[in-house]
Amino acid sequence: MDIVKHRQMTIKRIQVTSASGKYAVLCGHGVLQNARGEISRLGNFSSVHIVSSPKAWGAVGELVPARFASGSAAKLHLFNDAESAKTLESVEHIARSLSRAGADRRALLLAVGGGMVGDVAGFAAATYLRGIALAHVPTTLLAQVDSAIGGKTGVNLPEGKNLVGAFFSPRLVLSDPRALHSLPEREFRGGLAEVIKYGVISDSRLFAYLETHMEKVVRRDKTALAYIIPRCAALKAHVVSHDEHESGLREILNFGHTFGHALESVTNYRVYQHGEAVAWGMMAAALLGFAAGITPERDAARIISLTRRMGPLPPWPKTTIAKLISAMRTDKKTRAGKLRFVLTPRIGTARSYDSIPSEVLQRVLRFGPHLLAARR
């Protein structure tokens, strides 16, 4: 990770290696002030097309330059960023809007928004004219520390989450913590689940930092954000640079996600924000690891305790264990119908396991609704 002084700003530049070449993730307060220059260094584009949602653009649009190196104004395309709209219909809407605006193969698509905008706009960039250049301006904590990095794009089907998509790397990611200032409290807290995840799976020091400074992080303290955002981005960059297509190491990024995706699916993506479902999923994964004899009791307790400190969560859904397990079977890690879970043998490391006894999983799911009610 390189640290660059630009005027009065400290910008951290993180390199990511992908099959299509290297790209940079720039993190720091004021990064968007130099967005025009950073994008011009990518090359010449026939036009720039900003894809965002009304909510995200209304909150951060003033931070994004209106014109780029070509001198022409960027063209704005808006779509609904509710999780229930993460569909092929939204991709078609964006593609048709790009076509009507005259976007050609030398155009740049600039995705401005949270993880849902990045996933859908990224998939549109990957498929429109068989691929046009893509850059991300993530505007949520979840997107800045996780989803904008690594090239995963996709949409949901009624049968499950992210079942249609592509690996399509951006040319640039610009993460400015200023974009988080207007983020609603619930959305900011949801992003903390992914921050905690990185501590669990690969950085025990980050986890300990969060245990000590969680209140500062929740308050969006500038110093705390300046530490956790580039740290998580660097951890994500390391993983995806070594395993871009999720054939091995990258699976550890799914800690808590097998449970979380199932919770989203059984509630039709209308109850939880993604980070909230992951928070429940991490607590369930910690308990599953302990019940299976993989995660030490103290580590499981620390994970559950820290996750609770994120703040209130929507309750565990009123559904059956059978429905939850059925939803889990659509998870991308499932092999030949066999469920796989990312679990932690100790805080700071994680692996995938496919031999968890069914009775252990069912016991954890029965206890799921009580994870928040149990004694801290």
Image (spheres, rainbow, N blue to C red):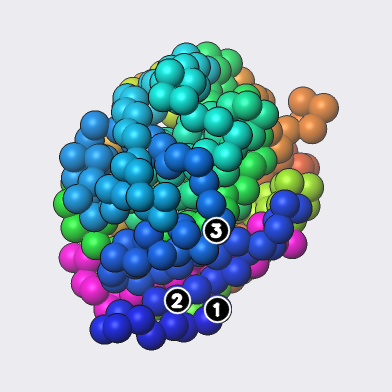
Image position of 170 (left or right of 350): left
Question: What residue do we see at 27% from left, 48% from top?
Answer: 66
Q: On the image, numbered disc 3 is attached to which residue?
A: 42
Q: Who is closer to the viewer here, 33 or 12?
A: 33
Pick whichever, 155 or 135, lies toward us: 135
> At label 3, which amino acid type do we have?
Leu
Q: Position of residue 180 (x, y in %)?
A: 25, 56
Q: Nearer the viewer, mark 2 or mark 3?
A: 3
Disc 1 from disc 2: Cα separation = 7 Å
Kindly identify which numbered label has been placed on residue 318: none
Q: Quadrant of residue 370?
A: top left
The CA span between labels 1 and 3 is 20 Å
Q: What residue range appears in magenta?
A: 219-242
| CB contact under 8 Å: marks 1 and 2 | yes
Badge 2 amino acid: Lys
The picture quadrant where one finds residue 302 is bottom left
